[in-house]
Amino acid sequence: MRKKSIAVAAPALALVVALAGCGSSDDDTAEDGLTTIDVGISPFQDTYLPIIGQEMGWFEEAGLKVELRSLAWNAAMPALISGDVDIAVNNTTGVVSVANADPNVVYAYGWNPFTEGSALMIRPGGDLETVDALEEQFGDRDEARTAMIESLAGKTIVTTLSTDMGKQITDALTSVGMDDSDVDFVDMDPDGGLAAFLSGTGDAYLGGVPQRGTALEQGMEIGLAGPDLAAPPINGAVTTRSFVTEEEDALLAFIDVMHRIVRYCDAETAACGETITDRLNAETAAGLTVEGFEEQWQNIELYAPNATAAQEMILDEEGVSYWRDTWDSDNAYLVETDSIPAEVEADSNFLMPQVWQAYVDAYGADQTDY
């Protein structure tokens, strides 16, 4: 990251853990006087939102020159660890998956609970029935959910393991007394997995929202989705401890633009969707339409327009996507699958409460305009 101080009045974060090294250099000041930060985004309709801030010039207004790097979902954490990016738009699962190996990686701030976004896709007319169809048979949603998950025994599921996608399936199995040994997995990146599934591989598939949309267009059905699977992932700013402490102003400015983007997309959903879908469809086989984006916006997943909304959704115990439930679920899944050697303590690697307070002190909690 090429540093230059941003004139934002914000107090220092009171972090209780030691600093790790920082890859930034005071000699790399941007010629235009902006603070340059490299941000990793993955090709999904939600994690591509920073494109709006870049195209609207809002990052520059905030004193930032944001360089966006499109990365595969499972490449974001390695890029952050190596110093190729300063911030990755990712989630708590990403942090928990690498924090034992690199304790410098932290979850800084969330704005996008993936409430209904995860969906287990199945083939119509196959051996699996949707939870909705089973609910009609049993007359009870919980009984139908259990029956649907139990019907996965012996089936092959295509997903991306050691990410929130694989975790959703494992959590669902665990909730009914099953485990990974009861099913067969095909571990592939989301786009490759979707292509394999549509070509006949596996009995069920779980990827991202664009892949879900394509699968639906190809006649697949939603077998199980959202909280019926597991605690929702929470997308947001994943970074390093050193960036949080040494580049606090840049981090808070970035967060402020992200909230501004959400408010813009709330007000101008079609225009927002056109920008995102144009870029997404140019870089992937998602085939997402503006109409599809509009239907999904603030529907299958939620976006916080300001700090108050972020607190209500994520930090409050009664929130729709309370962070502790997701964090504990991440640890349980990754330890059980031997993906990590030990649980990652939230006190050391989940910094959103401190960052949230610093952000509110600097920018306020209830912005409404864009």
Image (cartoon, rainbow, N blue to C red):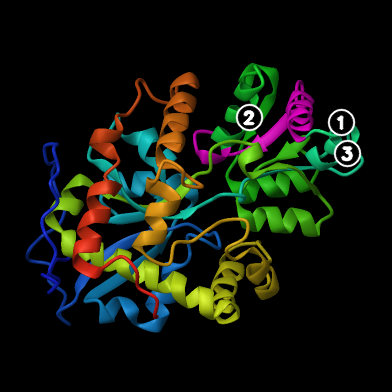
Instruction: Report the amino acid beneath label 3.
Output: Glu
- What SS does tag 3 mark? helix
Magenta stretch holds residue 186? no
| Residue at horizontal 60 percent and vertical 62 percent from the top | 284
For label 1, count other residues whose C-alpha is less than 10 Å away and answer few (under 14), some (14-19) or many (20+).
few
- Looking at the picture, does residue 288 appear above or below residue 127? below
Look at mark 3 in the image and give the residue it sits on: 136
| Residue at horizontal 81 percent and vertical 56 percent from the top | 218
Q: Where the C terminus falls, by quadrant?
A: bottom left
Instruction: Report the amino acid beneath label 2.
Output: Ala
Residue 41 lies, in percent from the top left, at 43, 59
Q: Mark 1 and 3 residues: CB-CB less than 8 Å, in contact?
A: yes
- Residue 172 is tagged as 2
Instruction: Report the amino acid beneath label 1.
Output: Phe
- Residue 138 is tagged as 1
Q: Tag 2 or tag 1, which sits nearer the N-term?
A: 1
Residue 309: quarter of image: bottom left
Q: Is residue 34 left or right of residue 222?
A: left
Instruction: Give the mark count.
Output: 3
Residue 90 lies, in percent from the top left, at 42, 50
- What SS does tag 2 mark? helix
Q: Which residues are magenta?
A: 141-165
Q: Is residue 174 left or right of residue 265?
A: right
Residue 268: quarter of image: bottom right
- Residue 33 is tagged as none
Magenta stretch holds residue 150? yes
Considering every residue shown, the one lying at the far left of the view is 27
Per the model, the C-alpha gap separating discs 1 and 3 is 6 Å
Per the model, the C-alpha gap separating discs 1 and 2 is 19 Å
- What SS does tag 1 mark? helix
Per the model, the C-alpha gap separating discs 3 and 2 is 21 Å
For label 2, count other residues whose C-alpha is less than 10 Å away and answer few (under 14), some (14-19) or many (20+).
many
